[in-house]
Amino acid sequence: MPVRNPAIVAFARHYGITIHTCVPADPASKGGSESSVKIAKADLVPKDTNLREQYTSFAELETACQEFCDHVNARVHRVTRRAPVEMLAEEHARLHPIPAAPHTVAFGVTRTVPPSTPMVSFEGGQYSVPVRLLGQTVWVRVHGQGAQEMIVLVHVGPTGPVEVARATPGSPKIDDDHFPHTPVGALERKPLARNTAEVEFLAIGDSARLWLSEAAAAGTTKIRVKMAQAVTLAKLFDTKDVDRALGQAAVHARFAEADLASILDHHQHTTNNAAVSRAGEDGSLTQGTASWAALGATPAPVPPVTGGDHAVMVNDARPEVTS
């Protein structure tokens, strides 16, 4: 007994038709199929006997089939003595209507959209679908040939089948409208404490959060050790001073092990020594070169100093007494 394909059974139930299974090697049980193949070979396939030219596209073959059907259905049949198109008008009243929505097998093969990314794979390519279809099933098929070949994706919802995407074959094919727009700042990572040590560090202030973000972005090593050092310094110094030092360290990219302590020490030294020399707008604290101007020059003679009975010669290092 032949076992029918479940998809064929569902297709027949959808359109209200009956399937008859042919017997192998028995042409009488499949006469309709044999006649269709014979007619197609004789009248539609390009041959020397029918003088048909080669088809350049599948659309041309479809047009040829439609023209052939119009020709033979309008011609009087030799057995019934009537044109098939006239008999079809009478039989139409006894035929049930075709469902408005086509069977899903006409939409191609099924693909399940992953719950994280709105992309499906088909024949080695990846194609995007609207993000609202995450975790749902879509149907994919190839439509057209050659330059007109397209990949069509359909979703069957409560209101019926709806085409949700169409793309040229290739991988990947991504439509930006299928993905949710990322709001500004959504990708910024904010520090979140997961243990007591991290809570104590972030409690220092906003500059501690800035320091952690900048240090992580710079690939700083031993961040947890340096965070613990900052917490210890916050207990020895004013918390506001430590927070300010962390902010300056973040701004100037000073993430070495002793940088925070060095900045704090500088602040303390500056605060304790209020009288700090500062250069004005019209001067500079840089040492000048005036003191080097007399280097190597011969000193000018100095006149003797007289007073009473003694005179001292300053030019000579040895003083002399004169009368």
Image (spheres, helix red, strand yellow):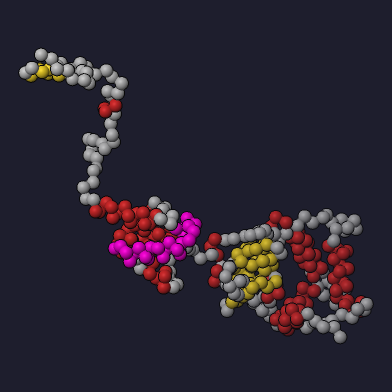
* Nearer-the-camera pick, 90 or 181: 181
* Nearer-the-camera pick, 69 or 16: 16
In the image: residue 242, left or right of residue 17:
left
Q: Residue furthest bottom?
A: 1
Q: Quadrant of residue 230?
A: bottom left
Image quadrant holding the C terminus, namely: top left
Residue 3 within the magenta-colored segment of the rendering: no
Q: Quadrant of residue 44?
A: bottom right
Residue 223 within the magenta-colored segment of the rendering: yes
> Residue 62: image x %, image y %?
76, 63
> Residue 189: image x %, image y %?
45, 64
In the image: residue 215, left or right of residue 116:
left
* Nearer-the-camera pick, 165 or 148: 165
Q: Residue at x 22, y 18 (%)?
A: 316
* Numbered range of the magenta stretch: 215-238
> Residue 288: image x %, image y %?
28, 31
* Nearer-the-camera pick, 30 or 321: 321
Q: Residue at x 54, y 61 (%)?
A: 176
In the image: residue 52, left or right of residue 60:
right
Q: Quadrant of residue 140?
A: bottom right
Q: Residue furthest right?
A: 25
Image quadrant holding the N terminus, namely: bottom right
Q: Is residue 199 visible?
A: yes
Q: Is residue 248 visible?
A: no
Q: Residue furthest left?
A: 308
Q: Residue at x 87, y 64 (%)?
A: 41
Specify the principal SS of the magenta part: helix
Q: Is residue 72 above or below residue 11?
A: above
Q: Residue at x 74, y 78 (%)?
A: 7
